[in-house]
């Protein structure tokens, strides 16, 4: 079930804002009533009209404020939208993205069908034109995204925004703006797909549904897709993965994606995404409160599919493999029980002390399966632990790695994508918490350092290659009844990581 996307036409232009023939020109105002350079141009052409409005106290330039002006003298645009930018010295990445989103939402709410946005001209420290345009496209699509096809009435605006022009200061910057536009659109499409998959309720988004959506996306964007069913996984010895889905009547699926854009024989990057399409906790049943949000426990897998859509659209010259173990974790007479011992694909045995620590049980077999591809690096991403949310909140994803250069590579990509991470320790000191007297290891290490011990568990299955783990439990979705929904993270981070590898 595909969500209807807002189809926008984007373009890049340079030129005087006062000469733009469009429904609306968007310009920025800093505190306290300081005009940005494009706003100054319009003010000069209108004989000080904007300055007069600001002196009247109608706007101070506070972040998030807007003021719509009609029929500004000597200006070809029908309207001018002033957007508050906050203090100029504090105008960094977040303020820039927030200003773009604020402008786009105002344009949507006021019925503008087209607009020229000059905020993309405003310098952001340590960022270039390509970054500005890419982030403006992503922020625009994010601001307009909606998931309402499950409702009886659509919330689409009466006159939806159809065309957006992003401004650059000089003609020489147009080619760099076009690069940002191309990347931004591909990443935004990948993020929207990840959001759609995450927001689809679990009575629809089952493991089989997710596999079918992966196949559709692969066919549409030129990469390969293979689906392994229960019998195929059993033949491979994936006892840990298969044990998690035993309590569900929805059969598991193991999704394998292949983007073969690099030279034949080049070692691939392998992306592994956890996809528990609903997590009730199994016999270790979760509390009822907020259990409705457990359809987002497939966000790692959704992000991998979203990233593949983006890299397929961009045609990256790189070999990439995606591995997505998909299942449900439900309580049933057949379900895993606390105290059960299962054998993983690696041959290592696991004592299941808590059936709600199931993500690591499906990822460990996927990490072992990754060895088949002789990978250059492996990155897994998962809504793995509530402990990660307590430690880092909703802003950065937690990063763990057994290889410092890989960790630095991910940190660099995360910063450029503005999809940030924070590296956490992966020390041997924590390994003792996973000891079991009956098996090779337990699947939990107790409450202290819960996100760390989960990563330490996964590390035991990733010793044969360079590996990183992203715990996205705090970043993959926004909770709460009124605002809950998928964020599509970390699609942007993954795409930038892969992009960087094509230009080394």
Image: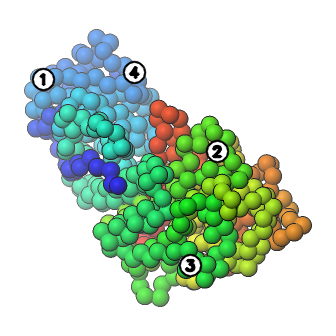
Q: Is residue 185 visible?
A: yes
Please, what secondary structure does the residue beneath circle 2 have?
A: helix
Whichever of labels 4 and 3 marks the residue nearer the N terminus, that label is: 4
> Where does the image place residue 156, in percent across and percent down from the top left?
26, 37
| Side of 83 relative to 414 (left or right) | left
Which dot, 1 or 2, sits closer to the camera? 2
Residue on which the image places disc 4? 32
Which dot, 4 or 2, sits closer to the camera? 2
Above-or-below relation of 47 to 138: above
Residue found 55% across the figure and 42% down from its top:
292
| Side of 74 relative to 123 (left or right) | left
Which dot, 1 or 4, sits closer to the camera? 1
Residue on which the image places disc 1? 71
Above-or-below relation of 426 to 38: below
Whichever of labels 2 and 3 marks the residue nearer the N terminus, that label is: 3
In the drawing, what numbered circle is on residue 389? 2
Please, what secondary structure does the residue beneath circle 3 have?
A: helix
Q: CA distance from mark 1 to mark 2?
A: 49 Å
Find the residue positioned furthest to the bottom. Answer: 265
Q: CA distance from mark 2 to mark 3?
A: 36 Å
| Side of 127 relative to 236 (left or right) | left
């Amino acid at each position: 079930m595909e969500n209807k996307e807002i189809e926008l036409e984007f373009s890049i232009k340079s030129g005087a804002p006062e000469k733009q023939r469009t429904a609306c020109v968007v310009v920025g105002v800093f505190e306290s009533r300081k005009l940005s350079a494009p706003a100054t141009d319009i003010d000069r052409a209108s004989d000080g009209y904007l300055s007069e409005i600001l002196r009247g106290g109608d706007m101070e330039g506070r972040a998030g404020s807007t003021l719509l002006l009609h029929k500004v003298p000597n200006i070809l645009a029908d309207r001018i939208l002033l957007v508050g930018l906050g203090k100029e010295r504090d105008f960094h990445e977040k303020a820039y993205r927030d200003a773009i989103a604020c402008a786009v939402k105002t344009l949507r709410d006021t019925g503008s069908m087209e607009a020229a946005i000059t905020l993309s001209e405003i310098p952001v420290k340590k960022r270039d034109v390509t970054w500005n345009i890419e982030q403006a496209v992503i922020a625009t699509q994010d601001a307009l995204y909606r998931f309402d096809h499950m409702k009886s009435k659509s919330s689409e605006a009466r006159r939806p925004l159809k065309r957006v022009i992003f401004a650059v200061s000089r003609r020489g910057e147009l080619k760099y703006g076009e690069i940002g536009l191309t990347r931004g659109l591909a990443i935004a499409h990948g993020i929207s797909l990840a959001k759609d998959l995450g927001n689809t309720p679990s009575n629809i988004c089952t493991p089989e549904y997710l596999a079918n959506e992966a196949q559709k996306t692969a066919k549409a964007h030129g990469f390969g897709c293979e689906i392994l069913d229960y019998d195929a996984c059993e033949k491979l010895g994936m006892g840990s993965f298969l044990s998690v889905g035993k309590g569900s009547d929805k059969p598991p699926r193991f999704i394998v994606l292949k983007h073969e854009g690099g030279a034949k024989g080049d070692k691939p990057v392998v992306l592994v995404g956890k996809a528990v399409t609903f997590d009730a906790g199994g016999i270790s049943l979760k509390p009822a409160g907020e259990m409705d949000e457990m359809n987002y426990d497939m966000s790692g897998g959704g992000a991998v599919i979203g990233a593949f859509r983006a890299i397929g659209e961009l045609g990256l010259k790189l070999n990439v493999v995606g591995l997505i173990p998909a299942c449900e974790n439900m309580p049933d007479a057949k379900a895993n029980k606390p105290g059960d011992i299962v054998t993983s694909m690696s041959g290592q045995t696991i004592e299941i002390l808590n059936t709600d620590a199931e993500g690591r049980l499906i990822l460990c077999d996927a990490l072992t399966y990754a060895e088949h591809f002789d990978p250059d690096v492996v990155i897994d991403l998962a809504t793995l632990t509530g402990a990660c949310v307590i430690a880092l909140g909703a802003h950065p994803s937690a990063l763990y790695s057994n290889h410092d250069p890989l960790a630095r590579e991910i940190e660099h990509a995360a910063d450029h994508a503005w999809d940030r991470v924070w590296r956490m320790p992966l020390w041997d000191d924590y390994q003792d918490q996973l000891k079991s007297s009956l098996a090779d290891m337990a699947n939990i290490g107790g409450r202290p350092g819960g996100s760390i011990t989960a990563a330490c568990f996964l590390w035991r299955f990733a010793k044969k290659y360079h590996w990183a783990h992203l715990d996205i439990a705090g970043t993959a979705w926004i909770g709460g009844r009124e605002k809950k929904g998928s964020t599509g993270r970390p699609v942007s981070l993954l795409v930038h990581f892969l992009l960087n590898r094509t230009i080394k």
